C-alpha cells in the first residue's frame, strides 16, 4: 500500500508536469472507484488551469479555481503523466488531458483509491478530522504527550490514529517505536514527555529518509512503463519477527496490536 513517503514522492514527481497546465478533457472509464466519481468533475475541470498540487495526509489535491480534485491511491493506485497517445490498458480508470499534449492517468487495479471533488472554499469531509502532518512543526513530543493523556490504547495504535497524526501507517509506526526504544504495547497515556520527544524525532527522521530515498524514482512518473515497486528503505523490525534484532542480536517478537501485525525487540524496546 502506498504510504505517506510514496504519496509525497508522487506529488514531487508530478508537480512540475501539472502546475500551470490547463485541463483539456476528463475521461472517466468507470463511474466509481472506492466511491462514485462525482460527475461534476467532467463538467468543471476542462478549461481550468491547475493552480497547484498538494498533499494532505495520503490525499493529493489538484487545485483549480472552482475547486480541487481529491485523489487517493488506495491499496494499488498510481498516477503517471504520459503522452496523450499512450494506449489505455486494463485498470487505467481516469485520464485528465493536459494542454502539454500529455495526460495524467490514474491506474488502480484494486479500486480502493478515489477521485472526489472539493468545491473551492470548502473542506471535504474526509479531510475534516485529520491530525497534524508528521513532518510539520505542529507534530512534536509535547503534542504527543498532551494528546495521549488518559488514552489506554497501545502507543502503536495511538500513533497510527489519523486523528492524532496523519500518514503513520503500520510499517513506519513499528520502525519509529524501535528507533525510539519504546515497546509498541505500552499504554499511550503512561509514556513520558521525554520518550514522546524521542518518538516524534524518530518518526520524522524515518519518514524524511524514506522520502529522500524515493527521490531516485522520480523519473518513473513520466515513463509509460513506470509501474513502481515500493521503497527499498531498510526495515529494522517490520516483518522480521523471529529474526535477530539488528541492534542486540536477540530474536524479535511478533504479536497483533489493534489487529495489526507488529514486531519489536523486548530487549531494546521498553
Ligand atoms: Zn534488540
Image (spheres, rainbow, N blue to C red):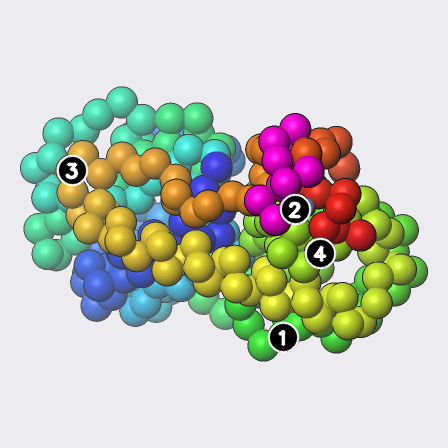
Viewer-proximal residue, 44 or 180? 180
Viewer-proximal residue, 242 or 15? 242
The residue segment tinted magenta is 241-250
Q: Calculate the distance from the C-alpha at mark 3 to the C-alpha at mark 4.
A: 43 Å
- Which of the numbered marks, if any, corresponds to residue 181? 4
Q: Foreground mark, 2 or 3?
A: 2
* Callout 2 secondary element: loop
Q: Looking at the picture, does residue 31 appear above or below residue 143?
A: above
Q: Are marks 1 and 2 in contact (CB under 8 Å)?
A: no
User: Which of the marked residues, 2 or 3, is nearer the chain's N terminus?
Assistant: 3
Q: Position of residue 191 (x, y in %)?
A: 84, 61
Q: Foreground mark, 1 or 2?
A: 2
- Which of the numbered marks, if any, corresponds to residue 224? 3
- Which of the numbered marks, if any, corresponds to residue 248? 2
Q: Calculate the distance from the C-alpha at mark 1 to the C-alpha at mark 2.
A: 34 Å
User: Which of the marked residues, 1 or 2, is nearer the chain's N terminus?
Assistant: 1
Residue 240 seen: yes
Amino acid at each position: 500500500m502506498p504510504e505517506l513517503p510514496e504519496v509525497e514522492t508522487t506529488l514531487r514527481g508530478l508537480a512540475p508536469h501539472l502546475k500551470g497546465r490547463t485541463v483539456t478533457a476528463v475521461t472517466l472509464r468507470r463511474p466509481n472507484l472506492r466511491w462514485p466519481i462525482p460527475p461534476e468533475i467532467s463538467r468543471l475541470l476542462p478549461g481550468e488551469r491547475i493552480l497547484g498540487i498538494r498533499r494532505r495526509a495520503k490525499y493529493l489535491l489538484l487545485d483549480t479555481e472552482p475547486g480541487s480534485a481529491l485523489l487517493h491511491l488506495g491499496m494499488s493506485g498510481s498516477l503517471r503523466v504520459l503522452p496523450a497517445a499512450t494506449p489505455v490498458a486494463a485498470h487505467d480508470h481516469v485520464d485528465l488531458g493536459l494542454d502539454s499534449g500529455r495526460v495524467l492517468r490514474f491506474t488502480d487495479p484494486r479500486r480502493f483509491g478515489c477521485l472526489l471533488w472539493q468545491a473551492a472554499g470548502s473542506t471535504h469531509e474526509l479531510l475534516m478530522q485529520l491530525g497534524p502532518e508528521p513532518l510539520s512543526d505542529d507534530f512534536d513530543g509535547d503534542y504527543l504527550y498532551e494528546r495521549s493523556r488518559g488514552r489506554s490504547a497501545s502507543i502503536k495504535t495511538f500513533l497510527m490514529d489519523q486523528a492524532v497524526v496523519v500518514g503513520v501507517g503500520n510499517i513506519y509506526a513499528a520502525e519509529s517505536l524501535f528507533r525510539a526504544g519504546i515497546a509498541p504495547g505500552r499504554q499511550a497515556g503512561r509514556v513520558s514527555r521525554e520518550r514522546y520527544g524521542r518518538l516524534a524525532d524518530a518518526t520524522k527522521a524515518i519518514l524524511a529518509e524514506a522520502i529522500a530515498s524515493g527521490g531516485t524514482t522520480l523519473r518513473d512518473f513520466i515513463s509509460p512503463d513506470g509501474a513502481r515497486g515500493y521503497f527499498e528503505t531498510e526495515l529494522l523490525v517490520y516483518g522480521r519477527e523471529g529474526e535477530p534484532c539488528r541492534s542486540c542480536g536477540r530474536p524479535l517478537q511478533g504479536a497483533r496490536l489493534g489487529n495489526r501485525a507488529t514486531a519489536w525487540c523486548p530487549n531494546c524496546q521498553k
